[in-house]
């Protein structure tokens, strides 16, 4: 039987290194949007903790445990990454497969925060945007999710179809930063 | 000339540069102005209106006269202030607004006829004949007047925008700014210190004085070193804060690549968000309006000191000084100390106390100057008589104006302070910002240092932080004494606004013609309307207006300073939008495959969709389109429809929610079935249409049109959060999760089955069925829906498999006599079938108009239902959707054309409707159109005249049903 071949959203576009900053693709599989129904948040939170070791995240926060992460994704919704949603959640929350919906890049290295400061209108100072902080914001003209995963590393998620533009924007910002530092 | 041993550039590397084709030498650290003055070049430009020879007036960003073009061709930057442009090896600068050259400028004839060109001249003169204005007068005036010109070419150099955040933004790095930054930084705040100069220090670099027992420049360097070493401080030189906005947001323009030949961005436009700010922008010296005060060689006294003390350049060999205050005396002393001949110090005050080894004229005034291309001599009238003094540089000072500009950006009005004859900021004009130093009207160095500490302390306190104890460095603490002197009467023009060529006479004329309001005066004379925003002329102009109208200065008031503080290039503000940065590009998973087939792309929203798939021998798009239409009607076609919005709707109240947002009913839709839905706006007009499938009891997936996907998502969120918050429903976009392909044509089932692990047939999967399927081992979804009128399916797989599935299906389709089809064919297929798109539901049409009023269910409430019942929206006389067929099959139909009765004149009052969509139908071998026609549904069979006034087309058409093909839907059901 014919088999369909999978391609990642940023296939062939990464890695990119300019100066001290590197962009690599992050695969998000599985990734499920969890949107608890009315009055089910506490139950959802408890089931998540029991199942995957991460609770339903507070606004603008990411929780992680043993390779499983859960990312706040807007009011009353979160993205569970790296593990399937516990079976008990069905009926308590809307579960939507989003593993193919986003293009996600990690941008890291000295100057990564400066490159993002060209594109993201959010205060990314470590004191205000510590590791584990996430924001639904913009990357230039694109709606994006930006998360700090290390003092000098971020994950940037945009719509899958905009992956090429994401790399274009990041590359341009990195080029400008490198030219300033030259 | 360069003065040996003076200035801060001692030991700097030499730099070669070019001005107007001549090569010169300067030093690293020179501005174009200081380097030209060092080479004894005084003539740098021609004035805006009269083409008067002009030199440099200032040493900062406020420069009105020495504007040059830097670079060539598409890379050229016009209107660069020579006082800000740093020189670098190879820089090529040129003067502007002159022809054929700077010394011999033909349009300086304007200067000879200047008596006719005073304020209001254009308004009065070029009024008639009216038609002449646009064709003749305006182009001529525009050519004659003006600054530098753009190249007319697009430039490829990158520009940047960036965001920064801090606790305290300090604007200006003079004595007040440095102390404010130091205080805030030692207090633990995150500090940004921004200064527009390449080198920080402000006036401390331009004066010969000591701070804390050290030369001011050394002390400055020490403080900057300390700041540089602190992790909570960011020094931003070459950065002009251009505007103050709400919520502590400031705009700032950084000159990045413009000071060197390096790659990288030319400029960066910053948005700085600060919890608090200290404005230490200093003060700007004002000229005095005496006769012919604009000759090259005449500049402000503070600028002369800056050129001497910072750049080691004396702008003249025999310098005279003219002032109304003690500060001007420093210029004479510094020059004399440096060994430059001071030909005379003229102080307008009879009681001025001056000591120095140079001629002094108290109670003196300059009543005339001479020298066409550069100052040669001045005539001084003083207590002892009248005398002509030979001089090639005149340093003038009418006092200092605090730089209040930023404090006015949120509508603050400055206050008049008579002791210094200047405006100072009104406290609290910008929330969170404290003004310090000479921007506050404090003019001694000691006072500025102390005020910087005070201001930063105040800001820290407002942020809940403790101000550290900072020792005040010792410094000069002289009083600033002046006696206002706005104008010296005499023969000759007394220039106020050097950039827009406005004189004292123009201001008086404005007052005489009753433009008494300062805002009216400004617009009548254009004073302050040049790119320097009147920084050099504003206070003097309104003092003169006050005098001419018999009022005081405070009553006369000021005009409004608006952002930006200095000109900002559009390229910098629009950075990030250059080239492909203009908008995101959205690519489908099949993009590469379509691209390889040579399909031209059309943009729909941000999506790139294939227009058609050319094959060898096909000469036009229509050839390909016709083939693709025939292919779908005869066998099978594949089209990527992933761009349509897909919205997952889940929850106990999902059905109720859909009944509320759709005009028709979805709660009755069985699981495993799809229904077409129509969505109305609150006003009863159609918002969007699409199909919604029921995947489970509490689970639907809605599709929207590509164009309205974002709009509908936003609408649903609004409804769920605001209108029906009691409903338990969750809405998630899955547009990007699924790659979805339409498979259409009589052989569509065969092709679909070639992909499915378990085959479908007509009985188990009839028209409008949906369900989960396995697509070559991958869990997917199948929908039996059609936008072509053929038997058709839409097959969806997770996006990672989209490219692969598309390639497989198109290859299989080709083996069956089918293949891919593009947007053009898709459009023809849907017009043949009478299906609507946003060409028809364009925002002004109702369900009634498109013939779907029966879809507005009255058995339940829905958004737009009540409004759609309004009187007038259900009238038979409304324009209704119809089909059009030309009487002669090949006759042209055009979208946008209007419809008229056969015999009626084609004028507005006879308008019967308009055409929305047209195509050539290869199936019916005729052109076809969809149109809205008054009482259209009752006029099938009638002949109507299509008139396209723009394209000059007239076609007789038969009105018919909009469904041209298979009205019974037999092909659909297969």
Image: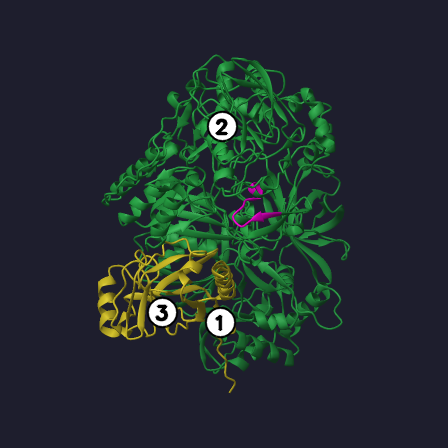
Chain colours: A yellow, B green
Which of the two discs, 3 and 2, sits closer to the camera? Answer: 2
Q: Quick check: B969 above or below B383?
A: below
Tell me, yes or no, if residue B545 can be seen here: yes
The residue shown at (50%, 70%) is B739
The numbered mark, 3 or 1, whose residue comes first in the sequence reads: 1
Image position of A77 (left or right of B557):
left
The residues colored magenta run B25-34
- x 64%, y 27%: residue: B376
Above or below residue B106? Residue B216 is below
- Same chain for mark 3 and mark 2? The answer is no
Q: Which mark is residue A32?
A: 3
Subunit under mark 3: A
Spatial CA span between label 3 and label 1: 24 Å
Determine which quarter of the picture holds residue B728: bottom left
Query: A65 or B229: which is nearer to us?
Result: B229
How far apart marks 2 and 1 lie (CA) works out to: 57 Å
């Amino acid at each position: 039987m014919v088999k369909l071949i999978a391609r990642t959203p940023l296939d062939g576009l990464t890695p990119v290194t300019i100066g001290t900053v590197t962009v690599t693709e992050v695969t998000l599989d599985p990734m499920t949007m969890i949107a608890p129904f009315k009055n089910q948040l506490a139950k959802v939170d408890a089931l998540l903790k029991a199942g995957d070791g991460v609770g339903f995240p507070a606004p603008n926060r990411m929780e992680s445990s043993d390779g499983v992460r859960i990312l706040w994704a807007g009011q009353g919704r979160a993205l569970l990454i790296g593990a399937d949603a516990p079976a008990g959640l069905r009926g308590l929350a809307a579960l939507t497969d989003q593993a193919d919906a986003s293009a996600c890049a990690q941008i890291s290295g000295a100057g990564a925060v400066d490159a993002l400061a060209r594109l993201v209108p959010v205060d990314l100072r470590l004191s205000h945007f510590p590791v584990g902080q996430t924001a639904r914001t913009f990357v230039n003209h694109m709606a994006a999710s930006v998360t700090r995963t290390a003092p000098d590393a971020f994950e940037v998620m945009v719509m899958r179809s905009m992956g090429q533009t994401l790399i274009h924007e990041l590359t341009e910002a990195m080029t400008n930063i490198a030219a300033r530092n030259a | 000339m360069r003065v040996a041993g003076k200035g801060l550039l001692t030991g700097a590397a030499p730099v070669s540069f070019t001005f107007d084709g001549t090569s010169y030498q300067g030093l690293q650290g020179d501005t174009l102005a200081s380097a030209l003055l060092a080479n004894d070049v005084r003539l740098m430009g021609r004035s805006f209106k009269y083409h008067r020879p002009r030199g440099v007036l200032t040493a900062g960003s406020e420069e009105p006269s020495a504007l040059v073009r830097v670079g060539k061709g598409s890379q050229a930057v016009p209107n660069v202030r020579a006082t800000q442009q740093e020189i670098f090896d190879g820089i090529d600068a040129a003067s502007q607004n002159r022809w054929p050259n700077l010394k011999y400028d033909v349009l300086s004839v304007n200067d000879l006829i200047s008596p006719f060109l005073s304020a209001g001249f254009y308004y009065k003169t070029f009024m008639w004949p009216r038609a002449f204005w646009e064709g003749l007068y305006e182009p001529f005036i525009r050519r004659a007047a003006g600054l530098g010109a753009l190249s007319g070419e697009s430039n490829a150099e990158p520009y940047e925008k960036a965001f920064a955040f801090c606790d305290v933004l300090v604007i200006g790095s003079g004595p007040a700014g440095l102390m404010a930054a130091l205080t805030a930084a030692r207090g633990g705040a995150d500090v940004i210190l921004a200064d527009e100069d390449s080198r920080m220090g402000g006036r401390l670099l331009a004066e010969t004085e000591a701070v804390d027992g050290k030369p001011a420049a050394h002390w400055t360097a020490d403080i900057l070193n300390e700041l540089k070493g602190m992790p909570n401080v960011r020094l931003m030189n070459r950065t002009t804060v251009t505007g103050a906005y709400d919520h502590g947001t400031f705009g700032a323009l950084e000159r990045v690549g413009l000071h060197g030949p390096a790659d990288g961005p030319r400029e960066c436009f910053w948005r700085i968000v600060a919890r608090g700010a200290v404005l230490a922008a200093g003060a700007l010296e004002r000229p005095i309006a005496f006769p012919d005060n604009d000759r090259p060689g005449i500049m402000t006294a503070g600028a002369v000191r800056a050129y001497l003390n910072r750049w080691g350049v004396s702008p003249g060999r025999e310098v005279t000084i003219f002032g109304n205050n003690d500060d001007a005396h420093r210029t004479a002393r510094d020059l004399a100390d440096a060994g430059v001949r001071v030909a005379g110090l003229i102080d307008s005050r009879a009681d001025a106390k001056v000591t120095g080894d140079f001629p002094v004229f108290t109670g003196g005034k300059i009543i005339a100057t001479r020298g066409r291309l550069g100052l040669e001599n001045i005539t001084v009238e003083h207590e002892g008589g009248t005398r002509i003094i030979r001089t090639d540089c005149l340093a003038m000072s009418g006092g200092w104006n605090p730089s209040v500009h930023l404090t006015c950006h949120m509508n603050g009005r400055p206050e008049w302070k008579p002791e210094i004859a200047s405006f100072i900021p009104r406290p609290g004009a910008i929330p969170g910002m404290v003004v310090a130093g000479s921007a506050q009207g404090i003019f001694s160095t000691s006072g500025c240092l102390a005020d910087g500490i005070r201001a930063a302390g105040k800001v820290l306190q407002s942020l809940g932080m403790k101000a550290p104890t900072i020792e005040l460095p010792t410094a000069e603490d002289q009083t600033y004494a002046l006696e206002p002197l706005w104008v010296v009467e005499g023969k000759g023009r007394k220039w106020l606004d050097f950039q827009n060529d406005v004189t004292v006479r123009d201001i008086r004329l404005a007052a005489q013609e009753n433009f008494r309001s300062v805002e009216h005066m400004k617009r009548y004379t254009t004073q302050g309307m040049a790119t320097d925003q009147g920084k050099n002329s504003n206070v003097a102009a309104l003092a003169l207006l006050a005098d001419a109208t018999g009022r005081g200065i405070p009553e006369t008031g000021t005009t409004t300073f608006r952002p930006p503080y200095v000109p900002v290039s559009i390229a910098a503000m629009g950075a990030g939008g250059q080239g492909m940065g203009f908008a995101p590009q959205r690519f489908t998973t099949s993009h590469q495959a379509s691209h390889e087939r040579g399909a031209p792309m059309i943009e729909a929203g941000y999506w790139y969709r294939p227009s058609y798939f050319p094959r060898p021998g096909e000469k036009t798009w229509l050839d390909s389109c016709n083939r693709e239409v025939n292919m779908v009607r005869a066998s099978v076609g594949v089209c990527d429809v992933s761009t349509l919005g897909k919205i997952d709707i889940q929850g106990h109240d999902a059905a109720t929610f859909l009944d509320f947002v759709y005009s028709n009913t979805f709660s009755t839709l069985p699981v495993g079935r799809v229904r077409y839905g129509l969505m109305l706006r609150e006003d009863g007009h159609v918002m969007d249409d699409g199909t919604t499938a029921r995947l489970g009891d509490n689970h639907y997936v809605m599709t929207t049109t590509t164009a309205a996907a974002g709009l509908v998502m936003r609408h649903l969120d609004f409804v769920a959060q605001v209108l029906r918050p009691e409903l338990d429903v969750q809405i998630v976009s899955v547009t990007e999760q699924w790659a979805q392909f339409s498979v259409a044509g009589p052989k569509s089932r065969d092709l679909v089955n070639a992909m499915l692990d378990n085959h479908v047939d007509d009985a188990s999967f009839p028209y409008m069925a949906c369900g989960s399927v396995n697509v070559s081992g991958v869990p997917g979804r199948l929908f039996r829906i059609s936008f072509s009128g053929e038997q058709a399916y839409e097959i969806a797989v997770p996006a990672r498999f989209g490219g692969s599935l598309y390639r497989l299906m198109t290859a299989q389709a080709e083996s069956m006599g089918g293949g891919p089809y593009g947007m053009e064919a898709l459009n023809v297929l849907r017009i043949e079938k009478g299906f609507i798109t946003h060409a028809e539901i364009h925002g002004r049409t109702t369900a009634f108009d498109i013939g779907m009023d029966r879809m507005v269910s009255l058995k339940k409430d829905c958004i737009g239902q009540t409004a759609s019942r309004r009187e007038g929206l259900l009238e038979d006389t409304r324009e209704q959707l119809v089909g059009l067929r030309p009487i002669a099959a090949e006759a042209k139909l055009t979208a946008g054309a209007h419809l008229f009765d056969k015999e009626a004149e084609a004028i507005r009052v006879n308008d019967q409707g308009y055409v929305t969509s047209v195509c050539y139908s290869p199936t019916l071998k005729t052109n076809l159109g969809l149109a809205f026609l008054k009482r259209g549904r009752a006029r099938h069979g009638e002949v109507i005249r299509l008139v396209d006034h723009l394209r000059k087309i007239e076609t007789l058409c038969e009105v018919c049903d909009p469904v041209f093909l298979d009205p019974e839907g037999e092909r659909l059901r297969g």
